[in-house]
């Protein structure tokens, strides 16, 4: 039996664990958090990624737990709605084909569908390859040997740093930062989204069908910022300083930030690498090719990448052949989807009040234009094409039922 360690229990890690299980492997998943992370923002599953979800037989469950958001409005400083759009127009998404779901819901559904071992509350501190094995040392001091290691541990991947080099070599900052957290629904939002824009900053609040609370999201442009990625208090102070003086509901939302159980803050960046494998170590998802939230395609790349990597590992004669085929199959798909983000931020976080006013007027008129569908198709053409710019191989012949031993979730003593 091939011993495979997956580092990271996000979308990519769970999806890879699922497909490796379907192919008869029994991987171990290690996750720094004490349990699956159920926070996060809303995300889209489109095109080829929905085909992966279909092959996982999770489509009905995914659709059942969609956000259900009906539309969105831009508001001014007094809270007056200056432009409103239905969800399909605002999101540029066909909800009969694609799905918008909260990240936490997707991770929970993927977790419940897997039958592999999870080791929570643990992280990797060292990786040493020797011969036909990889020796992994955990933060607890314990060491284990695996045949292969796959980093699915996100934008700031520890596996990537240990096996490929410093983050600065691969990270491409796109000029923005974002923060997301849960807050009380004092606005009474019912499956609706509100946005307030000032030069260089956006405040975004939305309520979904499965939650009594709302998600508060903050997006702003800035030069590169220096902060500790694990120091939440420092990140919250930075956000407070950035939004000082911003009106509407920003002060009230930020006052709820310290009590939020799921505060998230990070740069909006991409990962661009010449190779996604080094010996017996490989990367998948954001750790390998994060396209940034501006593309709207990070989840899709994670799902498709996990499917292809697991399939190639199942049918290749050795790990190097599998990793090479995985890279060949994914490279153009990744490039197409990363390209989307290059201009997206410029249309969302606007630098002047004049540009914000013109954008709002255009959005206000859009639902009444007879050619609005043509405008929408033109605006979403690039992302639609990129989301479908890959033909998924059929690895079905080698699929086996998942092991009957069941999932075991361990937390270190």
Image: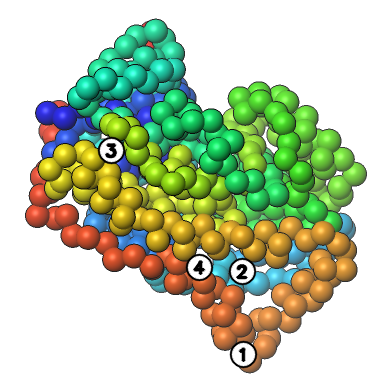
Q: Looking at the rendering, which quadrant does residue 120 occupy? A: top left
Q: Nearer the viewer, residue 353 or 255?
A: 353
Element carrying mark 2: helix
- The picture places residue 270, in percent across and down from the top left corner, at 56, 48
| Mark toward the viewer: 4 or 1 | 4
Element carrying mark 1: loop
Real-space Cα separation, disc 1 to disc 3, in angstroms: 45 Å
Give above or below for 330 relative to 107: below
Circle nearer the N terminus (4, 1): 1
Q: Residues within 10 Å of mark 1 (few under 14, many from 20)?
A: few
For the C terminus, which image quadrant? top left
Q: From where the camera sits, is residue 282 visible?
A: yes
Residue named by callout 2: 90
The residue positioned 61% from the left and 69% from the top of the image is: 90
Residue named by callout 3: 17
Real-space Cα separation, disc 4 to disc 1, in angstroms: 20 Å
């Amino acid at each position: 039996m091939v011993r495979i360690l997956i580092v990271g229990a996000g979308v990519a890690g769970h999806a890879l664990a699922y497909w490796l299980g379907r192919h008869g492997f029994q991987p171990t998943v290690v996750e720094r958090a004490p349990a699956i992370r159920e926070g996060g923002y809303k995300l889209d599953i489109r095109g080829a990624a929905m085909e992966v979800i279909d092959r996982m037989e999770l489509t009905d469950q995914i659709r059942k737990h969609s956000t259900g958001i009906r539309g969105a409005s831009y508001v001014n400083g007094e809270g007056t709605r200056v432009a409103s759009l239905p969800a399909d127009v605002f999101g540029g998404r066909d909800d009969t084909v694609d799905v918008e779901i909260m990240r936490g819901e997707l991770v929970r559904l993927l977790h419940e569908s897997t039958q592999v071992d999870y080791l929570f509350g643990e992280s990797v501190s060292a990786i040493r390859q020797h011969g036909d094995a990889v020796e992994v040392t955990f933060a607890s001091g314990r060491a284990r040997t695996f045949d292969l290691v796959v980093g699915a541990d996100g934008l700031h991947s520890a596996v990537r740093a240990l096996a490929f080099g410093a983050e600065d070599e691969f990270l491409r900052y796109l000029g923005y930062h974002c923060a997301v957290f849960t807050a009380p629904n004092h606005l009474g939002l019912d499956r609706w989204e509100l946005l307030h824009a000032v030069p260089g900053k956006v405040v975004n609040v939305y309520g979904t069908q499965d939650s009594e609370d709302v998600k508060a999201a903050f997006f702003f442009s800035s030069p590169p910022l220096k902060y500790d990625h694990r120091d939440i208090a420092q990140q919250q102070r930075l956000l407070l300083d950035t939004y000082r003086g911003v009106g509407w509901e920003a002060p009230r939302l930020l006052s709820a930030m310290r009590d939020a159980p799921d505060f998230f803050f990070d740069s909006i960046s991409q990962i661009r690498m010449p190779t996604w494998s080094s010996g017996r170590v490989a990367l998948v998802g954001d750790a390998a090719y994060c396209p940034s939230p501006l593309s709207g395609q990070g989840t899709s790349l994670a799902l498709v990448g996990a499917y292809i990597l697991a399939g190639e590992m199942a049918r290749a004669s050795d790990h190097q052949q599998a990793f090479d085929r995985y890279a060949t199959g994914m490279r153009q798909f990744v490039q197409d989807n990363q390209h989307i983000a290059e201009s997206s931020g410029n249309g969302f976080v606007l630098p002047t009040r004049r540009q914000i006013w013109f954008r709002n007027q255009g959005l206000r008129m859009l639902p009444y234009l007879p050619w609005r569908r043509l405008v929408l198709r033109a605006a979403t053409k690039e992302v639609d094409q990129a989301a479908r710019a890959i033909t998924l191989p059929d690895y079905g012949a080698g699929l086996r039922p998942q092991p009957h031993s069941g999932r075991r979730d361990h937390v270190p003593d």
